[in-house]
Image (spheres, rainbow, N blue to C red):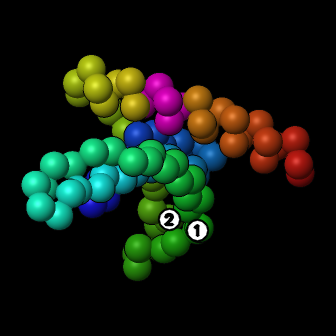
Amino acid sequence: MFNGMVTYSSPETNLVIVEVTVEQSEPGTMIREQTNTLTYVFKKIATNNGNGNDTTIPTVVPMHYGEFISYLEGQRTHEEIKNDYINKK
């Protein structure tokens, strides 16, 4: 089973950080256990929504403690990726 959540987004860099947790379940008991956590980084490609305006990436606003911790992890990932991307240009 996969569960995904956008943890951080940056309209300035057009990057979106998505965290996916992977769980495995036992066939007989259906007891689930987390096996992996995957982090994906997506870069928005310029798109047009049909009326001549470019669509923007919405900002992630955490509402609960767990979401805020994920937000901070996403922000750290964003900073690492951003610094690597800028240094390679």
Give the label on residue 54, or none. 2
Q: Specify the quadrant of the image occupied by residue 82.
A: top right
- Please report the residue visible at 69 percent of the width from the left and 42 percent of the height from the top: 81
Q: Are marks 2 and 1 in contact (CB under 8 Å)?
A: yes
Identify residue type, mark 1: Ala
Examine the rendering and report whether any part of residue 70 can be seen: yes
Identify residue type, mark 2: Asp
Dot 2: few (<14), some (14–19), or many (≥20) neighbours within 10 Å?
A: few
- Please report the residue visible at 23 percent of the width from the left and 56 percent of the height from the top: 25
Of all residues shown, which one is farthest toward the top?
65
- Please report the residue visible at 44 percent of the width from the left and 48 percent of the height from the top: 36
Give the left or right position of residue 64, taking residue 34 as reference. left
From the viewer's side, name the closer residue of 73 and 37. Answer: 37
The spot of residue 41 in percent (x, y) is 56, 53
Q: Is residue 72 magenta?
A: yes
Q: Magenta segment, which residues?
A: 71-75
Give the label on residue 46, or none. 1
Q: Specify the quadrant of the image occupied by residue 86.
A: top right
* 36 relative to 51, above or below: above
* Quarter of the picture holding the N terminus: bottom left
* 83 relative to 52, above or below: above
Q: Is residue 81 magenta?
A: no
Dot 1: few (<14), some (14–19), or many (≥20) neighbours within 10 Å?
A: few
From the viewer's side, name the closer residue of 54 and 6. Answer: 6
SS at mark 1 in the image: loop
